[in-house]
Amino acid sequence: ATQQLNPNADVLKSGQASLMNINAARGLQDVLKSNLGPKGTLKMLVGGAGDIKLTKDGNTLLHEMQIQNPTACMIARIATAQDDITGDGTTSAVLVVGEMMKQAERHLSDGVHPRLLCEGIELAKTSLLEYIDRTALVKDCADRDLLLQIAQCSLRTKMHRELADMFTAICVDAVLTIRKPDTPLDLHMVEIMHMQHKAGTDSRLVKGLVLDHGGRHPGMPKQLSKARVLTINYDLEYMRSEVNSGFYYSNAEEREKMVQAERKWVDDKTKLIIDLKRKACGEGETMVVINQKGIDPLALDLLAKEGILALRRAKRRNMERITLACGGEQVNSIDDMTPEVLGYAEEVSEQTLGE
């Protein structure tokens, strides 16, 4: 019946099918066993477009490989589940499965039924879980030295020693920074930003927020301290109408009046922000404006003259993080601004990498 559905399908008897599945598991084991541990070798992966990737991570290798055998695909899913739950141990999981299949092949050749082997593996799994629960030790998860040892054990198997030790401290400090007592960790509060202009050893942890855009006016300050943070989602530029409409004028004076009216609308909204700064900021304090929408050049000039750093077209995820990190709340209407909606940051600075 299988041959009628797919003439190219391979049809094997039960014994041959078992051997084929075992060979698939052993094949994956042979590929990954040289990756295990800090002395493991790097694998070079070349993509179809010629891009090159060097890695020792078992999960990355299994995702990049073109696996056709269904048994090998199932083992690759085991590694994916292991990576999702613990973030490490993918290579070990594949090697354990491969070794179990190798031992199962010996018993199958002696005539043991596969069902008995499966029952034996289940009994062994139950006994192993009981042993782990019985011998487990309770540790303080906030102990930095313990966390450093755990992270170092994982990272040294994936990159060279100097880089692994540096990233160990970065990872542990990042997690401890966002940790809140009696609250599950939200790892989305840690962002990895790729900067193409420097080496991997120049990586560092910023205990704050890093936005991948800066001020769009040369006169704006690059370094601020004691800054009140205003997050808004409001257009500070001339907005096009959402419907097809037109404005008609018969002479140059009418056109000039229309331009002035548009300019006045933006300037009035910008002056509301400047008035809020004068009202809310005390001596030695300044203001940062982060807008999810646009700010036109003339409005930027007004804000720069007042010593305000303004960022435009910020990403939505950054807007959410700013209110969580600095306090305050996002404003969707300029007319509703009060000093209570402002957040606070001890230090704000702008740095340029590369050109």
Image: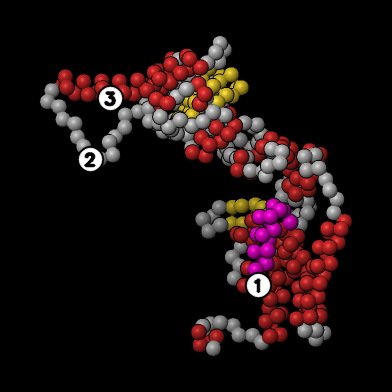
Which range of residues does the magenta coloring cover?
Answer: 74-89
In terms of secondary structure, where does tag 1 sit?
A: helix
Question: Gap in Å between the C-alphas at discs 3 and 1?
Answer: 67 Å
> Could you say where residue 167 lies in the image, as x and y percent from the top left?
71, 40
Find residue 262 and name its label: 3
Q: Is residue 85 magenta?
A: yes
Q: Is residue 220 left or right of residue 237?
A: right
> Could you say where residue 15 lies in the image, as x and y percent from the top left?
71, 85
Q: Which of the marked residues, 3 or 2, is nearer the chain's N terminus?
A: 2
Q: Which residue is mark 1?
A: 71
Q: Is residue 164 left or right of residue 216?
A: right
Q: Is residue 102 magenta?
A: no
Between circles 1 and 2, the one closer to the viewer is 2
The amino acid type found where label 3 is placed reads Glu
- Identify the residue at horizontal 71%, vertical 41% (top origin): 182
Characterize the local packing of mark 3: few (<14), some (14-19) or many (20 or more) Cα atoms within 10 angstroms.
some
Quadrant location of residue 99?
Answer: bottom right
The amino acid type found where label 2 is placed reads Asn
> Could you say where residue 108 lies in the image, as x and y percent from the top left?
78, 82
In the picture as drawn, the residue positioned furthest to the left comes out as 250
Q: Is residue 252 left or right of residue 99?
A: left
Characterize the local packing of mark 2: few (<14), some (14-19) or many (20 or more) Cα atoms within 10 angstroms.
few
Inspect this view and state whether residue 210 appears: no
Q: Which residue is mark 2?
A: 244
In the picture as drawn, the residue positioned furthest to the top comes out as 283
The amino acid type found where label 1 is placed reads Thr
